[in-house]
Amino acid sequence: MEKHNIQYQTVRFNLNGKDVERTVDVRASLTDMLRNDFRMTSVKKGCEVGECGACNVLIDGEAFNSCIYLAVWAEGKKVRTLEGLLGPNGELSDIQQAFVDEAAIQCGFCSPGFILTAVEILESGKEYTDAELRKLLSGHLCRCTGYENILRAVKKTMYKRLGKELPR
Amino acid sequence: MYDMKALYQAKSVKDAVALRLAHPEAQIIAGGSDVLVQMREGRRAGAELISIQTLDEIRGVSLDADGTLRIGSLTSFSHITRDPLIQKYINVLGEAVDQVGGPQIRNIGTIGGNTCNGVTSADSASTLHAWDAVVELTGPEGVRRQSIHDFYIKAGKVDLREGEIQTAILIPKESYENCFGHYIKYAMRNAMDIATLGTSVNVRLSADKKTVERARVAFGVAGPVPLRAETAERFAAGQPVSLELAERFAQAVKEDINPRDSWRAARDFRLHIAVESAKRAFIESVKLAGGDL
Protein backbone atom coordinates (compact mmCIF):
# COMPACT_ATOMS: atom_id res chain seq x y z
CA MET A 1 0.00 0.00 0.00
CA GLU A 2 1.09 3.50 -0.77
CA LYS A 3 2.29 5.41 2.28
CA HIS A 4 1.56 9.03 2.82
CA ASN A 5 2.38 11.53 5.51
CA ILE A 6 -0.23 12.60 8.00
CA GLN A 7 -1.23 16.17 7.31
CA TYR A 8 -1.93 18.49 10.25
CA GLN A 9 -3.49 21.90 10.34
CA THR A 10 -4.16 24.45 13.06
CA VAL A 11 -7.78 25.52 13.40
CA ARG A 12 -8.88 28.63 15.30
CA PHE A 13 -12.56 29.00 16.06
CA ASN A 14 -15.03 29.99 18.74
CA LEU A 15 -16.53 27.12 20.72
CA ASN A 16 -19.53 27.96 22.90
CA GLY A 17 -18.39 31.57 23.25
CA LYS A 18 -14.71 30.86 23.89
CA ASP A 19 -11.92 31.34 21.34
CA VAL A 20 -10.02 28.08 20.94
CA GLU A 21 -7.22 26.66 18.84
CA ARG A 22 -6.19 23.09 18.02
CA THR A 23 -3.86 21.39 15.62
CA VAL A 24 -5.81 18.56 14.01
CA ASP A 25 -5.35 15.81 11.50
CA VAL A 26 -7.00 17.12 8.29
CA ARG A 27 -8.86 13.81 7.96
CA ALA A 28 -10.84 14.55 11.13
CA SER A 29 -14.52 15.40 10.98
CA LEU A 30 -15.84 18.17 13.19
CA THR A 31 -17.48 15.42 15.29
CA ASP A 32 -14.04 13.82 15.82
CA MET A 33 -12.47 17.13 16.87
CA LEU A 34 -15.31 18.20 19.18
CA ARG A 35 -15.44 14.84 20.94
CA ASN A 36 -11.77 13.92 21.07
CA ASP A 37 -10.05 17.30 21.45
CA PHE A 38 -12.71 19.20 23.40
CA ARG A 39 -14.66 16.42 25.18
CA MET A 40 -17.94 17.75 23.82
CA THR A 41 -19.59 14.37 24.26
CA SER A 42 -23.08 15.74 23.57
CA VAL A 43 -22.03 15.50 19.92
CA LYS A 44 -23.01 11.90 19.23
CA LYS A 45 -21.59 9.53 16.68
CA GLY A 46 -24.66 7.99 15.08
CA CYS A 47 -24.84 7.09 11.41
CA GLU A 48 -21.77 9.16 10.45
CA VAL A 49 -23.19 9.77 6.98
CA GLY A 50 -25.41 12.78 7.66
CA GLU A 51 -28.72 10.98 7.99
CA CYS A 52 -29.57 10.72 11.68
CA GLY A 53 -28.75 14.20 13.04
CA ALA A 54 -27.23 12.94 16.32
CA CYS A 55 -24.00 14.89 15.68
CA ASN A 56 -25.82 18.15 14.88
CA VAL A 57 -24.13 21.40 16.00
CA LEU A 58 -24.74 25.06 15.23
CA ILE A 59 -22.18 26.79 13.03
CA ASP A 60 -22.70 30.55 12.75
CA GLY A 61 -26.28 29.95 13.87
CA GLU A 62 -27.19 27.23 11.34
CA ALA A 63 -27.58 23.51 12.03
CA PHE A 64 -25.01 21.17 10.48
CA ASN A 65 -24.33 17.47 10.82
CA SER A 66 -20.77 17.67 12.17
CA CYS A 67 -20.00 14.12 10.97
CA ILE A 68 -19.93 15.29 7.34
CA TYR A 69 -18.14 18.56 8.05
CA LEU A 70 -14.35 18.62 8.04
CA ALA A 71 -12.80 19.89 11.28
CA VAL A 72 -10.54 22.30 9.35
CA TRP A 73 -13.61 24.02 7.87
CA ALA A 74 -14.44 25.35 11.36
CA GLU A 75 -11.68 27.96 10.96
CA GLY A 76 -13.06 31.36 12.00
CA LYS A 77 -16.54 29.97 12.75
CA LYS A 78 -18.74 30.18 15.84
CA VAL A 79 -19.54 26.60 16.84
CA ARG A 80 -22.16 25.79 19.47
CA THR A 81 -22.86 22.44 21.09
CA LEU A 82 -25.40 21.43 23.73
CA GLU A 83 -22.81 22.15 26.44
CA GLY A 84 -23.02 25.82 25.47
CA LEU A 85 -26.71 26.03 26.37
CA LEU A 86 -26.15 25.48 30.09
CA GLY A 87 -26.17 28.40 32.49
CA PRO A 88 -23.07 29.33 34.58
CA ASN A 89 -24.01 26.86 37.32
CA GLY A 90 -25.16 24.12 34.99
CA GLU A 91 -28.78 25.32 34.82
CA LEU A 92 -30.84 23.92 31.97
CA SER A 93 -32.00 26.29 29.25
CA ASP A 94 -35.73 26.70 28.56
CA ILE A 95 -35.70 24.28 25.63
CA GLN A 96 -33.83 21.61 27.59
CA GLN A 97 -36.29 21.98 30.47
CA ALA A 98 -39.18 21.68 28.00
CA PHE A 99 -37.73 18.38 26.73
CA VAL A 100 -37.69 17.13 30.34
CA ASP A 101 -41.19 18.41 31.11
CA GLU A 102 -42.73 16.96 27.95
CA ALA A 103 -40.93 13.60 28.34
CA ALA A 104 -39.33 14.23 24.95
CA ILE A 105 -36.45 11.95 25.94
CA GLN A 106 -36.14 8.22 26.33
CA CYS A 107 -32.63 7.00 25.68
CA GLY A 108 -31.37 10.53 25.02
CA PHE A 109 -29.08 9.77 22.09
CA CYS A 110 -30.95 11.98 19.61
CA SER A 111 -31.69 14.75 22.14
CA PRO A 112 -28.60 17.01 21.78
CA GLY A 113 -29.03 17.13 18.01
CA PHE A 114 -32.76 17.76 18.22
CA ILE A 115 -32.28 20.48 20.85
CA LEU A 116 -29.72 22.37 18.74
CA THR A 117 -32.05 22.31 15.72
CA ALA A 118 -34.74 23.57 18.10
CA VAL A 119 -32.39 26.41 19.12
CA GLU A 120 -31.99 27.41 15.45
CA ILE A 121 -35.78 27.35 15.07
CA LEU A 122 -36.36 29.36 18.26
CA GLU A 123 -33.67 31.94 17.51
CA SER A 124 -35.29 32.76 14.16
CA GLY A 125 -37.95 34.48 16.30
CA LYS A 126 -40.68 33.26 13.96
CA GLU A 127 -43.95 31.50 14.67
CA TYR A 128 -44.28 28.25 12.78
CA THR A 129 -47.25 25.96 12.13
CA ASP A 130 -47.10 22.33 13.24
CA ALA A 131 -46.46 21.25 9.64
CA GLU A 132 -43.56 23.70 9.35
CA LEU A 133 -42.10 22.54 12.67
CA ARG A 134 -42.30 18.90 11.58
CA LYS A 135 -40.40 19.77 8.43
CA LEU A 136 -37.80 21.81 10.33
CA LEU A 137 -37.26 18.89 12.73
CA SER A 138 -37.20 16.24 9.99
CA GLY A 139 -33.40 15.94 9.86
CA HIS A 140 -33.29 13.88 13.06
CA LEU A 141 -34.08 10.26 13.77
CA CYS A 142 -35.43 9.18 17.16
CA ARG A 143 -35.55 5.39 17.44
CA CYS A 144 -37.56 5.49 20.66
CA THR A 145 -40.37 7.01 18.52
CA GLY A 146 -40.78 10.09 20.64
CA TYR A 147 -41.45 12.61 17.88
CA GLU A 148 -44.78 13.87 19.21
CA ASN A 149 -43.33 14.86 22.57
CA ILE A 150 -40.35 16.49 20.90
CA LEU A 151 -42.66 18.53 18.68
CA ARG A 152 -44.66 19.53 21.75
CA ALA A 153 -41.52 20.64 23.64
CA VAL A 154 -40.34 22.81 20.74
CA LYS A 155 -43.79 24.27 20.15
CA LYS A 156 -44.30 25.10 23.82
CA THR A 157 -40.94 26.87 24.03
CA MET A 158 -41.59 28.71 20.75
CA TYR A 159 -44.85 30.17 22.09
CA LYS A 160 -43.25 30.97 25.44
CA ARG A 161 -40.42 32.89 23.82
CA LEU A 162 -42.88 34.73 21.58
CA GLY A 163 -44.84 35.71 24.69
CA LYS A 164 -47.97 33.98 23.39
CA GLU A 165 -50.42 31.45 24.76
CA LEU A 166 -50.00 27.89 23.56
CA PRO A 167 -53.07 27.15 21.41
CA ARG A 168 -55.21 24.31 22.70
CA MET B 1 -11.37 10.16 10.50
CA TYR B 2 -11.89 10.09 6.79
CA ASP B 3 -9.78 7.87 4.60
CA MET B 4 -8.29 10.61 2.46
CA LYS B 5 -4.83 10.76 0.99
CA ALA B 6 -4.45 14.51 1.10
CA LEU B 7 -6.51 17.68 1.47
CA TYR B 8 -5.76 20.77 -0.59
CA GLN B 9 -7.66 23.84 0.53
CA ALA B 10 -8.23 26.43 -2.19
CA LYS B 11 -7.92 30.04 -1.03
CA SER B 12 -9.47 31.60 -4.15
CA VAL B 13 -11.03 30.51 -7.46
CA LYS B 14 -7.64 31.09 -9.12
CA ASP B 15 -5.99 28.92 -6.48
CA ALA B 16 -8.61 26.21 -7.02
CA VAL B 17 -7.83 26.16 -10.75
CA ALA B 18 -4.10 25.87 -10.00
CA LEU B 19 -4.77 23.02 -7.57
CA ARG B 20 -6.93 21.26 -10.18
CA LEU B 21 -4.07 21.43 -12.67
CA ALA B 22 -1.50 20.31 -10.10
CA HIS B 23 -3.64 17.40 -8.87
CA PRO B 24 -5.76 16.19 -11.79
CA GLU B 25 -6.78 13.02 -9.94
CA ALA B 26 -8.13 14.89 -6.93
CA GLN B 27 -11.85 15.13 -6.22
CA ILE B 28 -13.40 18.58 -5.71
CA ILE B 29 -15.31 18.90 -2.45
CA ALA B 30 -17.80 21.73 -1.89
CA GLY B 31 -20.34 21.02 0.87
CA GLY B 32 -19.26 17.41 1.30
CA SER B 33 -22.70 15.84 1.71
CA ASP B 34 -22.01 13.58 -1.29
CA VAL B 35 -18.21 13.32 -1.34
CA LEU B 36 -17.70 12.60 2.37
CA VAL B 37 -20.53 10.07 2.42
CA GLN B 38 -19.03 8.29 -0.61
CA MET B 39 -15.64 8.37 1.09
CA ARG B 40 -17.16 6.80 4.20
CA GLU B 41 -18.81 4.11 2.06
CA GLY B 42 -15.39 3.33 0.61
CA ARG B 43 -16.20 4.45 -2.93
CA ARG B 44 -13.81 7.38 -2.74
CA ALA B 45 -11.58 5.95 -0.03
CA GLY B 46 -7.96 7.05 -0.26
CA ALA B 47 -8.74 9.96 -2.61
CA GLU B 48 -7.11 13.37 -2.65
CA LEU B 49 -9.54 16.22 -2.08
CA ILE B 50 -9.51 19.82 -3.27
CA SER B 51 -11.74 21.76 -0.88
CA ILE B 52 -13.47 24.83 -2.28
CA GLN B 53 -15.80 25.03 0.75
CA THR B 54 -14.40 28.33 2.04
CA LEU B 55 -14.52 30.31 -1.24
CA ASP B 56 -17.08 32.95 -0.24
CA GLU B 57 -16.54 34.76 -3.57
CA ILE B 58 -18.73 32.13 -5.29
CA ARG B 59 -21.41 32.05 -2.60
CA GLY B 60 -24.67 34.05 -2.78
CA VAL B 61 -27.26 35.23 -5.29
CA SER B 62 -27.07 38.48 -7.29
CA LEU B 63 -28.20 40.15 -10.51
CA ASP B 64 -25.66 40.85 -13.27
CA ALA B 65 -25.82 44.18 -15.15
CA ASP B 66 -27.78 42.58 -18.03
CA GLY B 67 -30.41 41.19 -15.65
CA THR B 68 -28.99 37.66 -15.53
CA LEU B 69 -29.67 35.97 -12.21
CA ARG B 70 -26.35 34.73 -10.81
CA ILE B 71 -26.33 31.92 -8.24
CA GLY B 72 -22.84 31.32 -6.89
CA SER B 73 -22.04 27.62 -7.07
CA LEU B 74 -21.40 27.36 -3.33
CA THR B 75 -24.77 28.83 -2.35
CA SER B 76 -26.44 26.35 -0.02
CA PHE B 77 -29.97 25.07 -0.65
CA SER B 78 -31.36 26.83 2.42
CA HIS B 79 -29.83 30.15 1.37
CA ILE B 80 -31.32 29.77 -2.13
CA THR B 81 -34.77 29.14 -0.64
CA ARG B 82 -34.52 32.20 1.62
CA ASP B 83 -33.03 34.53 -1.01
CA PRO B 84 -35.26 37.49 -2.02
CA LEU B 85 -34.05 37.47 -5.67
CA ILE B 86 -34.84 33.77 -6.00
CA GLN B 87 -38.25 34.31 -4.42
CA LYS B 88 -38.95 37.15 -6.84
CA TYR B 89 -37.73 35.65 -10.11
CA ILE B 90 -37.57 31.85 -9.81
CA ASN B 91 -39.45 30.89 -6.69
CA VAL B 92 -39.85 27.31 -7.92
CA LEU B 93 -36.09 26.76 -7.59
CA GLY B 94 -36.23 27.74 -3.92
CA GLU B 95 -39.16 25.37 -3.43
CA ALA B 96 -37.42 22.52 -5.26
CA VAL B 97 -34.19 22.70 -3.28
CA ASP B 98 -36.22 22.98 -0.07
CA GLN B 99 -37.08 19.31 -0.68
CA VAL B 100 -33.49 18.04 -0.71
CA GLY B 101 -32.64 15.67 2.19
CA GLY B 102 -33.35 17.31 5.53
CA PRO B 103 -32.68 20.73 7.09
CA GLN B 104 -29.02 20.11 7.99
CA ILE B 105 -28.31 18.74 4.50
CA ARG B 106 -29.90 21.86 2.99
CA ASN B 107 -27.56 24.01 5.10
CA ILE B 108 -24.42 22.29 3.77
CA GLY B 109 -25.44 21.07 0.29
CA THR B 110 -24.63 23.42 -2.59
CA ILE B 111 -26.24 23.97 -5.97
CA GLY B 112 -22.84 23.52 -7.61
CA GLY B 113 -22.38 20.11 -6.01
CA ASN B 114 -25.95 19.13 -6.84
CA THR B 115 -25.27 19.72 -10.56
CA CYS B 116 -21.61 18.64 -10.77
CA ASN B 117 -22.35 15.16 -9.45
CA GLY B 118 -24.40 14.62 -12.61
CA VAL B 119 -27.20 12.76 -10.88
CA THR B 120 -30.59 12.65 -12.59
CA SER B 121 -32.52 12.72 -9.29
CA ALA B 122 -31.00 16.00 -8.06
CA ASP B 123 -33.87 18.20 -6.90
CA SER B 124 -32.38 21.32 -8.51
CA ALA B 125 -31.69 19.66 -11.85
CA SER B 126 -35.14 19.45 -13.42
CA THR B 127 -35.92 23.07 -12.57
CA LEU B 128 -32.56 24.27 -13.91
CA HIS B 129 -33.23 22.34 -17.12
CA ALA B 130 -36.75 23.72 -17.36
CA TRP B 131 -35.41 27.27 -17.05
CA ASP B 132 -32.54 26.83 -19.53
CA ALA B 133 -29.90 27.58 -16.92
CA VAL B 134 -26.37 28.35 -18.01
CA VAL B 135 -23.40 26.87 -16.17
CA GLU B 136 -20.39 29.12 -15.63
CA LEU B 137 -17.08 27.30 -15.46
CA THR B 138 -13.76 28.88 -14.58
CA GLY B 139 -10.56 27.26 -15.80
CA PRO B 140 -6.99 28.00 -16.85
CA GLU B 141 -8.19 29.81 -20.00
CA GLY B 142 -10.73 31.91 -18.12
CA VAL B 143 -14.49 31.73 -17.92
CA ARG B 144 -16.64 29.49 -20.11
CA ARG B 145 -20.42 29.38 -20.25
CA GLN B 146 -22.38 26.34 -21.24
CA SER B 147 -26.04 25.43 -21.46
CA ILE B 148 -27.06 23.08 -18.64
CA HIS B 149 -28.46 20.73 -21.31
CA ASP B 150 -24.95 20.18 -22.68
CA PHE B 151 -23.31 20.20 -19.26
CA TYR B 152 -24.80 16.81 -18.41
CA ILE B 153 -23.06 14.18 -20.55
CA LYS B 154 -24.29 10.93 -19.02
CA ALA B 155 -25.25 9.55 -15.61
CA GLY B 156 -22.68 10.81 -13.12
CA LYS B 157 -20.64 12.61 -15.79
CA VAL B 158 -20.67 16.34 -16.51
CA ASP B 159 -18.58 18.49 -18.83
CA LEU B 160 -16.12 19.71 -16.24
CA ARG B 161 -12.79 19.98 -18.06
CA GLU B 162 -9.16 19.91 -16.98
CA GLY B 163 -8.41 22.60 -14.41
CA GLU B 164 -12.01 23.80 -14.24
CA ILE B 165 -14.38 24.42 -11.37
CA GLN B 166 -18.01 25.44 -11.63
CA THR B 167 -18.36 29.00 -10.33
CA ALA B 168 -22.00 29.91 -10.98
CA ILE B 169 -25.40 28.89 -12.28
CA LEU B 170 -26.93 31.65 -14.39
CA ILE B 171 -30.58 32.18 -15.29
CA PRO B 172 -30.82 34.59 -18.26
CA LYS B 173 -33.44 37.35 -18.03
CA GLU B 174 -35.24 36.09 -21.14
CA SER B 175 -35.65 32.77 -19.36
CA TYR B 176 -37.19 34.00 -16.10
CA GLU B 177 -39.08 37.13 -17.16
CA ASN B 178 -42.83 36.71 -16.59
CA CYS B 179 -42.36 32.98 -16.03
CA PHE B 180 -44.01 31.06 -13.22
CA GLY B 181 -43.28 27.49 -12.33
CA HIS B 182 -44.02 24.59 -10.05
CA TYR B 183 -41.98 21.55 -8.99
CA ILE B 184 -43.34 18.20 -7.84
CA LYS B 185 -41.06 15.74 -6.12
CA TYR B 186 -42.54 12.29 -5.99
CA ALA B 187 -40.83 10.32 -3.22
CA MET B 188 -41.76 7.68 -0.68
CA ARG B 189 -41.13 9.88 2.35
CA ASN B 190 -41.49 13.57 3.11
CA ALA B 191 -37.87 14.01 4.20
CA MET B 192 -34.46 12.41 3.72
CA ASP B 193 -35.50 10.74 0.49
CA ILE B 194 -34.42 10.74 -3.13
CA ALA B 195 -36.96 11.55 -5.83
CA THR B 196 -38.66 8.63 -7.56
CA LEU B 197 -39.48 11.28 -10.16
CA GLY B 198 -38.99 15.04 -10.24
CA THR B 199 -41.17 17.23 -12.47
CA SER B 200 -40.64 20.95 -13.07
CA VAL B 201 -43.02 22.96 -15.25
CA ASN B 202 -43.09 26.69 -15.98
CA VAL B 203 -45.25 28.85 -18.21
CA ARG B 204 -45.35 32.34 -19.64
CA LEU B 205 -48.83 33.55 -20.50
CA SER B 206 -49.97 36.27 -22.88
CA ALA B 207 -50.83 39.70 -21.42
CA ASP B 208 -54.54 38.79 -21.21
CA LYS B 209 -53.62 35.47 -19.49
CA LYS B 210 -55.67 33.53 -22.03
CA THR B 211 -52.89 31.98 -24.09
CA VAL B 212 -49.80 29.96 -23.23
CA GLU B 213 -46.90 31.80 -24.89
CA ARG B 214 -44.33 29.31 -23.73
CA ALA B 215 -44.44 26.20 -21.56
CA ARG B 216 -41.36 24.29 -20.47
CA VAL B 217 -41.16 20.98 -18.66
CA ALA B 218 -38.19 18.97 -17.43
CA PHE B 219 -37.90 15.74 -15.48
CA GLY B 220 -35.42 14.13 -13.16
CA VAL B 221 -35.23 10.29 -13.06
CA ALA B 222 -37.10 10.04 -16.38
CA GLY B 223 -33.83 9.15 -18.10
CA PRO B 224 -30.13 8.77 -17.25
CA VAL B 225 -29.78 12.57 -17.05
CA PRO B 226 -32.40 15.27 -16.40
CA LEU B 227 -34.30 15.98 -19.63
CA ARG B 228 -36.84 18.23 -21.30
CA ALA B 229 -40.05 17.03 -22.90
CA GLU B 230 -39.99 19.20 -26.01
CA THR B 231 -42.91 17.54 -27.81
CA ALA B 232 -45.22 18.60 -24.99
CA GLU B 233 -43.69 22.10 -24.99
CA ARG B 234 -44.26 22.54 -28.74
CA PHE B 235 -47.77 21.25 -28.35
CA ALA B 236 -48.68 23.81 -25.66
CA ALA B 237 -47.04 26.88 -27.21
CA GLY B 238 -49.60 29.34 -28.53
CA GLN B 239 -52.58 27.33 -27.27
CA PRO B 240 -55.46 28.79 -25.27
CA VAL B 241 -55.34 28.08 -21.54
CA SER B 242 -57.68 25.23 -20.59
CA LEU B 243 -57.87 22.08 -18.51
CA GLU B 244 -58.00 20.07 -21.71
CA LEU B 245 -54.68 21.61 -22.73
CA ALA B 246 -53.21 20.58 -19.37
CA GLU B 247 -54.33 17.00 -19.99
CA ARG B 248 -53.01 16.82 -23.56
CA PHE B 249 -49.76 18.58 -22.64
CA ALA B 250 -49.25 16.01 -19.89
CA GLN B 251 -49.97 13.05 -22.17
CA ALA B 252 -47.44 14.37 -24.68
CA VAL B 253 -44.54 14.15 -22.22
CA LYS B 254 -44.49 10.38 -22.83
CA GLU B 255 -43.05 11.07 -26.29
CA ASP B 256 -39.76 12.32 -24.85
CA ILE B 257 -39.08 10.55 -21.58
CA ASN B 258 -37.50 7.20 -21.07
CA PRO B 259 -37.60 6.13 -17.41
CA ARG B 260 -36.17 2.84 -16.25
CA ASP B 261 -37.12 0.10 -13.88
CA SER B 262 -35.23 0.39 -10.61
CA TRP B 263 -35.71 -0.80 -7.06
CA ARG B 264 -37.37 2.55 -6.32
CA ALA B 265 -40.09 2.22 -8.95
CA ALA B 266 -41.05 0.44 -12.17
CA ARG B 267 -40.83 2.17 -15.55
CA ASP B 268 -44.60 2.02 -16.02
CA PHE B 269 -45.21 3.62 -12.65
CA ARG B 270 -42.75 6.40 -13.46
CA LEU B 271 -44.51 7.02 -16.78
CA HIS B 272 -47.80 7.23 -14.93
CA ILE B 273 -46.58 9.73 -12.33
CA ALA B 274 -44.75 11.74 -15.02
CA VAL B 275 -48.06 12.40 -16.80
CA GLU B 276 -49.96 13.11 -13.59
CA SER B 277 -47.20 15.36 -12.20
CA ALA B 278 -46.86 17.26 -15.49
CA LYS B 279 -50.59 17.93 -15.48
CA ARG B 280 -50.70 19.10 -11.88
CA ALA B 281 -47.54 21.21 -12.22
CA PHE B 282 -48.86 22.77 -15.45
CA ILE B 283 -52.16 23.72 -13.80
CA GLU B 284 -50.36 25.15 -10.77
CA SER B 285 -47.95 27.12 -12.99
CA VAL B 286 -50.83 28.62 -15.00
CA LYS B 287 -52.53 29.65 -11.75
CA LEU B 288 -49.32 31.24 -10.45
CA ALA B 289 -49.03 33.13 -13.73
CA GLY B 290 -52.52 34.55 -13.18
CA GLY B 291 -54.34 32.28 -15.60
CA ASP B 292 -57.79 30.89 -15.02
CA LEU B 293 -58.71 27.26 -15.67
Image (cartoon, coloured by chain):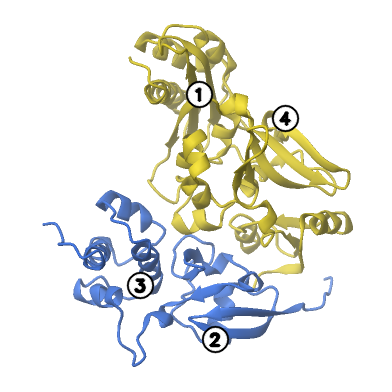
Chain colours: A blue, B yellow
* x then y, percent, for residue B13: 77, 55
**Where does label 1 land, which residue?**
B178
- Do the residues at pointers 1 and 4 share their chain? yes
Mark 4, residue position: B150
Residue at 31% across, 55% down: A133
Q: CA distance from mark 4 to mark 3?
A: 46 Å
The kind of residue on which mark 4 rests is: Asp
- Mark 2: amino acid: Phe
Q: Which marked residue is nearer to the observer: mark 1 or mark 4?
A: 1
Viewer-nearest residue: B168 or B28: B168
For the C terminus of chain A, the image quarter is bottom left
Q: Quadrant of the N terminus of chain A?
A: bottom right
Question: How packed is label 2: few (under 14 Cα within 10 Å), some, or many (20 or more)?
Answer: few
Q: Can you see residue A33?
A: yes
Distance, label 1 to label 4, CA atoms, is 25 Å
The Cα atoms of the two marked residues, 2 and 4, are separated by: 48 Å
- N-term mark: 2 or 3: 2
Residue underneath mark 3: A111
Q: Nearer the viewer, residue B73 or B22?
A: B73
The reply to whether dot 1 and dot 2 touch (C-beta < 8 Å) is no
Identify residue for label 2. A38
